[in-house]
Amino acid sequence: MLPVVGLEIGTTKVVALTGEMLEDERIVLTGKGEHISVGLRKGEVVDLEKAAGCAKKALKEAADEGAVEVGEIVVAISGGHIRGQVYSGHTSIQGAEGLVSEDDIEDVEMNAESVSLPGDREMIHTIKQRYRVDDHERVVNPLNMAGSQLSLNILGIHGSRTHLRNLDRLAACFQTEVQDVVFGGLASALAVLTVEQKRSGVAVIDLGAGTTDYIAYADGVMACGGSLGLGGDHVTNDLVIAFNIAQKRAEALKCKHGMAIVESSASPEKIALPAELGFPARTVNLRSLNTVINARIDETLQKVKSRLEKEGLLARLGGGVILTGGGARMSGVQRLAESVFEVPCRIGNPGANVLQGTAVEGPEYATCCGLLQYALRMQKMNESEGRGSLFGQMFRGLFRGGVR
Amino acid sequence: MKTPFVYKLIRKKATDATGARLCIVGVGKTGCMVVDRCAADSVGLKDTVAVIGMDGRHLESLGVATRIKIGDAKGAGGQVRVGREAAERDIEMLRGVVEGCDILIAVAGLGGGTGTGALPVLLKVARESGVFAVALVAMPFGFEGNLRRGVAEEGLKRIQDRADVVMLADAGDLALTGAKTDDPAEAAFARSLSALSAGVGSLWQVLATPTLMSLDQSDFKFLATKGSGTCVFVYGTASGVDRVAKATEMLKTSPGLSHLGGLKGTGGALLCVCGSHNLTMQEVADGIDPLNQELPEDSDVRTGVAIHEGWQNRYFVAAFVADRKRTVKAAPRTTKRTRTVKRGDSHSQVEQPEFNLDVPASPKSGAGRFNRMAATILDGENLDIPTYKRRGIELP
């Protein structure tokens, strides 16, 4: 099958991956490119030219390694403007003898997907949840069931039109076209989750630098998703303000010494910081450092928790919480998340589900791996005309490439 | 987040024949009065409506169960910006109002602060939640001055951008419908208000109560597809002998319709007929037929007929008429000045409301790296400020 290219333009780094699907439906990663990112804040493009320059470098690196000619790319989108919402569609069953026909299913799908959004918003994904035939809820496939009213719930994920357009323009800067846009949280979930986890209920939280994306599954269907404009940059910024140190130094301090939980060690350790241009030599109390970090990450997780709570999902996370993104590398974050959500937490490893022609290791690659999985499965689905495969059924009508 | 006083969010939701949940919300003083009046008139409506306003004392005086006070101020003071900012600050409460609804009918008078400022915010919240948003808005009286009219027109544009269907009425037109020249002003004012509340009431009657001929959400959605999504509200009402003929004539000659060039120029209409228990079949036919004959042949007409509990001998017909043209022009501005402004008296300029509706109200965060960006504000908290500071944690 054709190789695909996924591009995630994050707030601190750009990752590009190339990959393809083997005959036996396994996915193999063939190339990887990575570059530090400038021109983004909180996951949103603020300097198009700079961002495009970084993305181009990463893309070239990946294309060279994977020996791919880049024409179209699949891009991740994230940011506080993303919103997930359940919409429902209804239709009265018209099939012969009061049985649900394929036309009825099509009708209800159309009905559910035709959401009227304000002019400045655009739908990114419409993901089918479960059907309902009269009072019979959670129907997976209603075909030929008897009843009078057919309903379908979909999870619509939509974002700001401006930001979606920015991605198109960004791609145009390096002579490529956007084949598809995927919500970053959804991509991360695709990369790290198993069917079993989705069935027992699970939340994936992607702790990025600029944004925190989340997606939750319950009973095998995607129940909610969204994004907060909060991330690792906020942690760094808090340290800058708390200790009056330079941005770079705060970032280094966070990565090297930072912990998401405050350990009650008896003797508070001091970290010595040598003098730097404009900043005198000084020491930082390790406990203070961790207190600042803990407060911020705890708050971020609490915000996600309250969002899940609103949807009534907290009690349904049998599969626990999976953390991805660069923030998942922070030591102690797993324990902190466990104490916040009161369920087992794991760090997601996207490398486990794919064959690696190139080395991809660590939770920060989850989004980009997910992009590849999404694009390849979508390609597969388009080949086999959608019907039949479960993935195809779930994501039908969501491939934006053809529409734009 | 501060919640000054929310009495309770709507507990019951009225549903139409297809099970779509309906919610009627009044915004601003006029909107609140219309909805309150309407709730008092119609049995069972009281618990399914909400009012949103800034003037706490006015809200207190209303009989509606769900009363929501937005903002800290006692009123918007005619400032659109104040109304909008209050709504944006308490956006979660607005979200609570539309939550679980399928159709929202929001009522407001334009030209003031709260209705003009807060209604667009409510509509936006509704649309984001996938609620089909219908706005019934009244333009101010001509003699309220061009300034107020300008505010209203600017607000109307906002509302047209955000609502699925805009039902437009002109306070002056409503008051003048069927009026004689020597009618006292008091009666004319009262009529404007009661026409609006009867209009809302009739919509509710045909949508949400089991009735003779009911409408459902699809009938609303068809209005959105006709022309510009804006339609004009006209009505006729009468009681006693010949009530149907009188009311129909009143509707046909109403000033609101004459701005459109009569019923002939329309692309579609929603007719809501309400009568008392002694309404006869003949009367229903007599009421609707003449209107149908006037409407162009290819226009789409949906008709609902309901019996209004508690009415005696009264007959009311409301028509929501969609214009064929892309845009519906509001009634022309009044050319006569009703108040002479003395030279050098710049008082009216000083009080000019702000119109800078496009600038978002989000404050710039003053926090380090995010200095020049719009702040991340969730649940009324600026999250760009370090957490430890907001939580008041002392660093060891």
Image: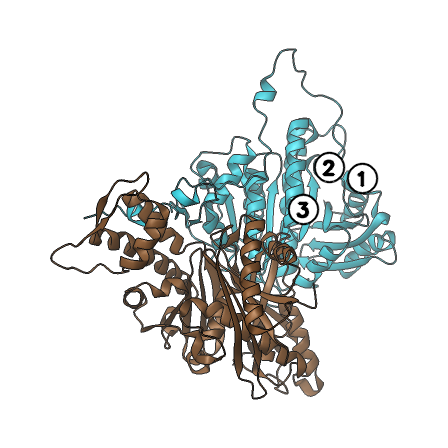
Residue A107 lies in quadrant: bottom right
Task: Classify mark 3: helix, strand or loop.
Answer: helix
Can you identify the residue that label 3 sits on? B160
- Marks 1 and 2 sit apart, C-alpha to C-alpha, by 10 Å
Amino acid identity at mark 2: Asp
Task: Classify mark 1: helix, strand or loop.
Answer: helix
Disc 2 crowd rating (10 Å Cα; few below 14, some 14-19, many 20+) is many
Relative to B124, residue A265 above or below:
below
Chain seen in cyan: B
Chain for numbered disc 2:
B
Name the N-terminal-most of marks 2 and 3: 3
Can you identify the residue that label 2 sits on? B173
- Marks 1 and 3 sit apart, C-alpha to C-alpha, by 19 Å
Q: Residue at x 69, y 59 (%)?
A: B221
Would you say B283 lies left or right of A307 here?
right
Of badges 1 and 3, nearer the viewer stands 3
Chain for numbered disc 3:
B
Residue A196 lies in quadrant: bottom left
Q: Which mark is residue B259?
A: 1
Nearer to me, B192 or B21: B21
Chain for numbered disc 1:
B
Q: Residue at x 68, y 58 (%)?
A: B306
Relative to B60, residue A178 above or below:
below
Q: Residue at x 76, y 46 (%)?
A: B247
Task: Indicate the position of residue B89 as horizontal and vertical percent values.
Answer: 46, 44
Would you say B222 lies left or right of B136 here?
right
Name the N-terminal-most of marks 1 and 3: 3
